[in-house]
Image (cartoon, rainbow, N blue to C red):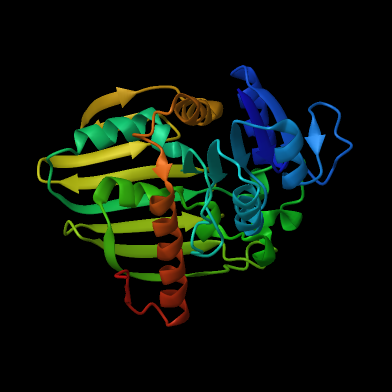
């Protein structure tokens, strides 16, 4: 399969490397058209016309996703399309194009602990859940200045809400659609960035559960956990340690390398196995929730409806 990766920052490089490991002939779209290691095109239009890909991964800055997808649609691209998370910086309507299938890159859906938790929660009544993710931003990209990263810049679509929106997607995946939320967040002053470095969201779901989602650029060491109170006990998932427990019993213990979930996601896209992938509408639901959280925060934590 011929693949085209749009964007060649850290995440674009990861996608390109994994696709090549999976046997895909891979080209990239980058402003740095002097790159030697892969066929490289300066624009989406040129890459589409000359490379004729069957699979495209949009992995440029969040603020540039919509433009890239619009160009693919206008160019008549008919293959598979994966757009890195979040799908767009704002809840734009997804451009209509002849894509055979399109999905959003919430690769943590493929984490084995998430899969085990999802199965364990079937047919359980959930009362409350707590999802937390945090990592000290200067540690994210070794060898680079975090203050110059897209995470630090509003114009690039950065900030904890968008960068760490995996947990929002997982809350909706595990506990169903939300109907309202309250949220607070902002800049702590501990980092030299113009975007928010922490956010706390309390989400009320249609299933009657309350999900608390905490996202930050500040935790040391890094944390990524989900705690769920059900009618039969409390489940605790640690995605970094690779464990799932129920009360005092260990249900799952596994080792997960960072590439594993990306690899599984690409295999699902290549093989047309859509059951775990994040559909476009689900990805847009995450963006709408992010925008509601921003409105709530701007209004001092006021309740925001998620009804259309």
Q: Nearer the viewer, residue 207 or 198?
A: 207
Q: Is residue 301 above or below residue 162?
A: below
Residue 113 appearing in the image:
yes
Residue 105 appearing in the image:
no
Across and down, in percent, residue 252 comes to 30, 25
Locate residue 220 relative to residue 169 in the image: left or right.
Answer: right
Q: Nearer the viewer, residue 195 or 278?
A: 278
Q: Quadrant of residue 79?
A: top right
Across and down, in percent, residue 140 comes to 64, 44
Q: Is residue 61 above or below residue 295?
A: above
Across and down, in percent, residue 278 comes to 41, 43
Q: Nearer the viewer, residue 169 or 145?
A: 169
Residue at point 32%, 52% (across, down):
172
Locate residue 209 relative to residue 146 in the image: left or right.
Answer: left
Across and down, in percent, residue 11 comes to 64, 39
Figure quadrant of the N terminus: top right
Residue farthest toward the bottom in the current orientation of the protein: 299
């Amino acid at each position: 399969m011929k693949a085209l990766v749009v964007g060649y920052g850290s995440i674009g490089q990861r996608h390109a490397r994994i696709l090549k490991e999976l046997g895909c002939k891979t080209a990239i779209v980058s402003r740095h058209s002097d790159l030697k290691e892969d066929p490289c095109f300066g624009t989406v239009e040129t890459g589409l016309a000359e490379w004729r890909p069957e699979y495209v991964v949009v992995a440029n800055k969040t603020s540039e996703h919509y433009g890239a997808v619009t160009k693919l649609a206008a160019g008549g691209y008919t293959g598979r399309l994966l757009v890195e998370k979040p799908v767009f910086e704002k809840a734009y309507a997804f451009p209509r194009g002849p894509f055979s299938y399109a999905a959003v890159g919430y690769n943590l859906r493929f984490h084995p602990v998430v899969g085990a938790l999802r199965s364990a929660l079937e047919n359980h009544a959930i009362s409350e859940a707590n999802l937390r993710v945090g990592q000290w931003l200067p540690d994210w990209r070794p060898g680079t200045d975090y203050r110059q990263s897209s995470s630090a810049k509003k114009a690039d679509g950065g900030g904890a809400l968008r960068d760490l929106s995996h947990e929002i997607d997982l809350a909706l995946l595990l506990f169903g659609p939300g109907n309202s939320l309250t949220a607070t967040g902002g800049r702590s002053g501990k980092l030299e960035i113009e975007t928010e470095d922490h956010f706390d969201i309390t989400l009320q779901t249609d299933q009657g559960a309350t999900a608390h989602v905490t996202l930050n650029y500040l935790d040391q060491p890094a944390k990524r956990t989900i705690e769920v109170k059900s009618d039969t006990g409390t489940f605790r998932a640690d995605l970094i340690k690779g464990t799932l427990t129920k009360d005092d019993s260990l249900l799952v213990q596994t080792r997960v390398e960072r590439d594993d979930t990306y690899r599984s996601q690409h295999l699902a896209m290549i093989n047309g196995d859509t059951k775990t992938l994040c559909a476009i509408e689900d990805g847009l639901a995450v963006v709408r929730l992010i925008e509601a959280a921003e409105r709530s925060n701007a209004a001092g934590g006021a309740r925001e409806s998620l009804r259309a």
